[in-house]
Amino acid sequence: MIELPASYKEFLADKSQLFIDTVRPVLMQSAAEKLHGVRVVYNPGSTGHQAHLDDTLPFGVVLEDID
């Protein structure tokens, strides 16, 4: 089983279950590869949050942004 780094666990600590379910797969992918960080983007409207690997961020970094 892949273990999330402490920074990812801390990022998720105060988030809703819906948010966690949305971004966790990308955090897991980042933790498996250990190459890049994760950018979490908020899209207004019905799409909500999206997450993707970001090669400009070092592994272990999560950055929230607005699209």
Image: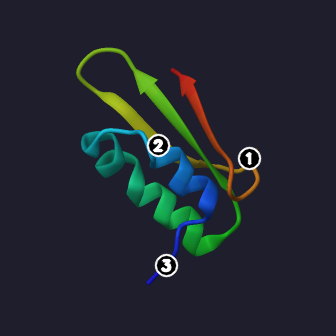
User: Which residue is drawn at the image coordinates 33% and 40% (left, top)?
Assistant: 19
Depicted 63 relative to depicted 22: above or below: above
Depicted 31 relative to depicted 42: above or below: below
- Callout 1: 10 Å neighbours few (<14), some, many (20+)? some
Q: Amino acid at mark 2?
A: Ala
Q: Position of residue 61 (x, y in %)?
A: 68, 49
Label 3 – label 1 distance at C-alpha? 20 Å
Q: Which residue is mark 3?
A: 2
**Which of the 4 quarters of the picture holds residue 24?**
bottom left
Q: Amino acid at mark 1?
A: Leu
**Is there a contact, CB below 8 Å, between mark 1 and mark 2?**
no
User: Which residue is drawn at the image coordinates 30% and 39% (left, top)?
Assistant: 16
- Callout 3: 10 Å neighbours few (<14), some, many (20+)? few
Q: Position of residue 25 (x, y in %)?
A: 39, 59
Q: Position of residue 45 (x, y in %)?
A: 28, 15
Which dot marks residue 46?
Answer: none
Label 2 – label 3 distance at C-alpha? 18 Å
Q: Secondary structure at mark 3?
A: loop
Please give left or right for residue 51 compared with residue 31 in the image.
left
Which dot marks residue 57?
Answer: 1
Q: Amino acid at mark 3?
A: Ile
- Mark toward the start of the polypeptide (1 vs 2): 2
Q: Secondary structure at mark 1?
A: loop
User: Which residue is drawn at the image coordinates 76% and 44% (left, top)?
Assistant: 56
Which dot marks residue 51?
Answer: 2
Foreground of the two, 23 or 53: 23
Depicted 2 relative to depicted 5: above or below: below
- Callout 2: 10 Å neighbours few (<14), some, many (20+)? many
Q: Secondary structure at mark 2?
A: strand
Label 1 – label 2 distance at C-alpha? 13 Å
